[in-house]
Amino acid sequence: MLRFVATRLSSLVLSLLVASIVIFAVIEVIPGDPAAYMLGLNAEPSAVAALRDQLGLNGSVPLRYLHWIAGLMTGDFGVSYTYRVPVATLIAARLWVSLPLALFALALSTLIAFPVGLLAAARRGRPADLAVMGTTQLGIAVPNFWFAMLLVLIFAIRLRWFPAGGFPGWDQGLWVSLKALLLPAVALALPQASILARIMRSSVLDTLGQDYIRTARAKGMTRAQAIRRHALKNALIPVLTIIGMQFSFLLAGAIIIENVFFLPGLGRLIFQAITQRDLIVVESSVMLLVFAVITVNFVVDIAYAAVDPRLRRRR
Amino acid sequence: MRVPRTLIIGAALFGMFLAAALLSYLWTPFDVTALDIAARLRPPGAVHWFGTDHFGRDIFSMIMVGARTSIAVAIVAVAIGIGIGTPLGLAAAARHGGLLDEIVMRGNDLVFAFPSLVIAILITAVFGPSALNAIIAIGIFNIPVFARIARSGAVSLWTLDYILAARVAGKGRLRISIEHILPNIANLLIVQGTIQFSLGILAEAALSYVGLGAQPPTPSWGRMLADSQTMISFAPHMALFPGLAIVLAVLGLNLMGDGLRDLLDPHLRRWRQ
């Protein structure tokens, strides 16, 4: 087990290292001088040069990379060119929208997918199964931002039950904030739930084909008992891996949905920062997202290996 | 061999869009670049089947031409993935456990860890928004998908007797990969290709929705949806039809993928029965 953790840990560090180099390199290629951008078209060249110096843009490339990495490790993400506030503060504020939204969507998707997938597996080949497979096939094909627009049209514009966009802030009350996040969360959750329900179904069906289930049935258990007692736990392993991946997808993938609903989240921050050439914000927030994704996958891997010794031997 | 019903339905759905895209080179009901302000925001009717947009352009015609953009972007992105990913996967499997194998697999893990949409947005922002850059951004993320599929398919084939026979006969790893491995993993690649095709259409729609795909005046489904957003309360037809086009095209491809898998993978067919 210790060996397994050590191997995984070294590959985690290596991944983060390569990721940081790639992100840094991509940002280096972006045309445009942030200093000139900040000061506008009529700026004195000397003022631009002074600002470049102040922003640390004049150092050599490896030096700037090391400076950036050292900053990330100590929680100093640099200062945004356009907002003129520390990037860490900006990201923290946006995370208060993105993180709850991702968790909300993940909870919805899981709550829908588990019973639906299980039902389809239990009723394999019957009308309920066919209905689930048909609906989820459609759910996978629907682009989440279009679904979001339809939700806005029906529930915000026609019925006026929910706001069409924006976020009031958590200090305006829990209910108001959750209400603002509900439609975006549903829009994000639907395609995810469709994928998850299908994986749940096939995973349960796979497990039902195992010998130990036949043994359980031979002992006199009913199909439902065998599912509940033995199949469910084993079927959850691949499902939980997908949930881990979906969480990171929801965190990063909300970028489009945040645009539909004008939510001040991390995705929208990255998007705006790219168009405004606010490179330090892009650099640090993309790195943070990648860090989150890699770390979540690492934790999931370790958790399984701890629970299921069979997985430690797998590469 | 019985052709699965999903394959027929899927091929019919997708074929409809392919035909519309091809037909649009020769004929569309209206010119998609002609603005007709007098006829703007018309609801669906006998003249404009799907209505008109805020510039008076015919939405049916725009969807036909938009199909061109979507299909072209997705097809080239898949070609990039197969063209680069498959050789990588084959090479990795030919020296299973070797240095190249390790590099390919680690590289794959890494690409999967990147939030693909964010990176795609980054790429299109760096090199400027255009259909070509959207293709590259989507195509890059197809590479590890096909590398992984090709590798896992090839690794299991390398242990089989007929490959051993080929090696005994003196064939090199490269020749075996091309002559014996590749034809046998072609099925896997075709099925995955269909799935990546549909994901490519969704990704292109998302990119052009945020303004980073094909640029005006080239119609694209994603940008039609973006344009419709501010008018959704009084012209919902502008949002309805491009969205339906995306859903049906993607659904068609996914059904085709399912059907092809059933048709081409005898192992799975047995398992299903």
Image (cartoon, grey):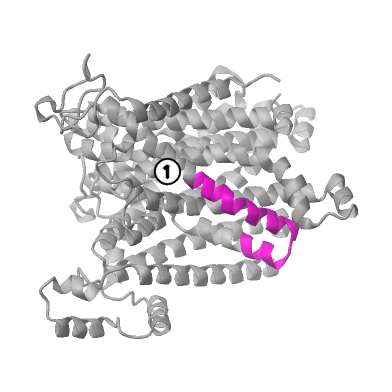
Please tell me whether mark 1 sits on a helix, a strand or a loop: helix
Can residue B28 be seen from the camera position used here?
yes
Q: Position of residue A294 (x, y in %)?
A: 51, 62
Vertical relation: B51 (above or below) B100: above
- Relative to B224, is A297 on the left or the right? right
Report the quarter where the C terminus of chain B lies: top right
- Relative to A19, is B145 on the left or the right? right
Q: Residue at x 38, y 56 (%)?
A: B118
Tell me which segment is drawn in magenta: B77-105
Q: Residue at x 44, y 33 (%)?
A: A141
Asked whether A169 or A69 is in front, the reply is: A69
Residue designated by label 1: B73
Q: Position of residue B168 (x, y in %)?
A: 90, 53
Vertical relation: B5 (above or below) A187: above
- Relative to A127, is A77 on the left or the right? left
Query: Residue extending furthest front?
Result: B26
Vertical relation: A156 (above or below) A81: above
Instruction: Determine if the magenta segment contains residue A295.
Output: no
Quadrant of res A82: bottom left
Vertical relation: B191 (above or below) B148: above
Q: Main secondary structure of the magenta part?
A: helix
Q: Residue at x 62, y 55 (%)?
A: A304
Asked whether B74 or B145 is in front, the reply is: B74
In the image, what residue type sits under mark 1? Val
Chain designation of label 1: B
Q: Residue at x 24, y 32 (%)?
A: B32
Query: Residue extending furthest top?
Result: B46
Instruction: Determine if the magenta segment contains residue B103.
Output: yes
Q: Position of residue A228 (x, y in %)?
A: 63, 34
Quadrant of res A54: bottom left
Q: Position of residue A190 (x, y in %)?
A: 41, 36
